[in-house]
Image: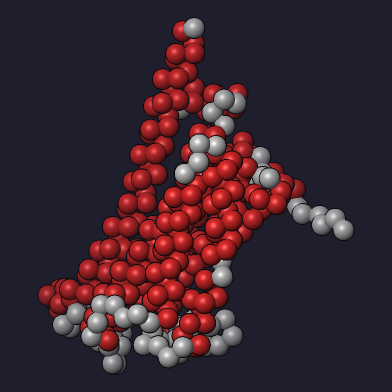
């Protein structure tokens, strides 16, 4: 496995496993947060806009 | 004197044109980001050789350096867009500036957090009040200030202007971050990449880093476009073209 003898070695990262995986976890977490936040914002806008449009059409 | 820009540059100022063109670009940037970030992470985590001094903790570089670069680029874009909005009263520029702030703040958190985690095994401390680290923390606070100001006013245009002025004043922090490692004695190591020099590390270490940097930029472009598109729809919701977009959604 690349630079590592085994999968256990890969997870251990020498003695720095905690630091490395915590950093990559934070990186992934913040990337996903950005993606999810923008998707929610989009849904919220379209839900409201559709409701407004229906109300206008009724009048 | 009159400067002539290409046509697309003027078209960018049109909300509908911006919405249409970013709709076409968005899937490309999203796929590129996903591909590059996956390749870069696997390469950096598994195949790059360990550092001869730091061992495997050095692999944090593949998150830390791209996020630190991006946090600053995003700030510069936000300030420039704010200035364009202030000077030429272009509403799309303010939309872009406003969309930069939450993304930049989150990326600054990423740079600070991964830096702290990297500092612990390398320097023996999570945090030191060092010039580079403090300037980066100020960058994060500037993002928060811009975020707060842009939504603090009843009138949207006032919020846009106030946020743009703060972003421009805060621009002075960017060269301070860049040169902090040269002006002051610091624990922080100097720049990994310089345009004028060959990187001081072997290719199998810096190629994945370059891939990650480009991947982060693609990710930023995608999220920024997505955010700016929604902000555009919200601000233009009374126009006919937005009603058509909503009807067809």
Residue B40 in view, yes or no: no
The location of residue B92, given as percent across then percent down, is 61, 44
Q: Quadrant of residue B3?
A: bottom right
Front residue of this view, candidates A11 and B5: B5
- Indicate how the structure is coloured in the image: secondary structure
Q: Residue at x 38, y 34 (%)?
A: A43
Please identify the quadrant where the N terminus of chain B is shown: bottom right
Q: Residue at x 15, y 77 (%)?
A: A12
Residue B230 location, x and y as percent? 48, 39
Picture coordinates of residue B55, whole percent (x, y): 25, 87
Whether residue B137 is visible to the viewer of this picture, yes or no, is: yes
On screen, residue B31 above or below B170 = above
Label tally: 0
Q: Say whether residue B84 is left or right of residue B103.
A: right
Above or below, B94 relative to B56: above
**Residue at 59% over, 41% down:** B157
| The residue positioned farthest toward the top in the image shown | A59
Looking at the image, the residue that sits furthest to the left is A8
Q: Quadrant of residue A25?
A: bottom left
Image-based side of A26 in relation to B231, left or right: left
Q: Residue at x 54, y 39 (%)?
A: B156
Q: Name the foreground residue: B99 vs B136.
A: B136
Residue B99 location (% of width, % of height): 49, 49
Q: Is residue B149 above or below residue B118?
A: above
């Amino acid at each position: 496995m690349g630079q590592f003898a085994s999968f256990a070695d890969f997870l251990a990262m020498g003695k720095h496993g905690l630091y490395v995986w915590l950093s990559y976890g934070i990186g992934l977490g913040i990337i996903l947060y950005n993606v999810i936040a923008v998707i929610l914002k989009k849904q919220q806008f379209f839900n409201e806009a559709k409701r407004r449009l229906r109300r206008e059409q009724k009048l | 004197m009159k400067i002539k820009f290409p046509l697309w540059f003027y078209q960018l100022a049109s909300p509908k044109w911006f919405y249409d063109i970013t709709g076409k670009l968005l899937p490309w940037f999203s796929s590129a980001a996903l591909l590059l970030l996956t390749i870069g992470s696997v390469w950096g985590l598994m195949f790059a050789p360990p550092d001869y001094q730091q061992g495997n903790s050095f692999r944090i570089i593949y998150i830390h350096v791209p996020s630190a670069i991006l946090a600053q680029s995003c700030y510069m874009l936000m300030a420039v867009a704010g200035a364009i909005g202030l000077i030429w009263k272009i509403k799309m520029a303010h939309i872009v500036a406003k969309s930069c702030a939450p993304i930049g703040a989150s990326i600054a958190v990423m740079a600070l957090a991964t830096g702290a985690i990297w500092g612990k095994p390398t320097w023996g401390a999570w945090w030191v009040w060092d010039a580079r680290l403090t300037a980066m923390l100020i960058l994060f606070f500037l993002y928060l200030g811009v975020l707060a100001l842009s939504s603090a006013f009843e009138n949207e245009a006032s919020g846009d202007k106030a946020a743009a002025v703060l972003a421009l004043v805060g621009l002075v922090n960017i060269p301070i971050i860049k040169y902090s490692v040269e002006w002051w004695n610091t624990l922080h190591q100097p720049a990994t990449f310089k345009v004028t020099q060959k990187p001081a590390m072997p290719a199998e270490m810096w190629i994945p880093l370059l891939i990650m940097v480009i991947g982060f930029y693609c990710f930023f472009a995608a999220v920024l476009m997505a955010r700016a598109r929604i902000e555009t729809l919200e601000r233009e919701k009374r126009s006919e073209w937005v009603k058509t977009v909503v009807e067809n959604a």
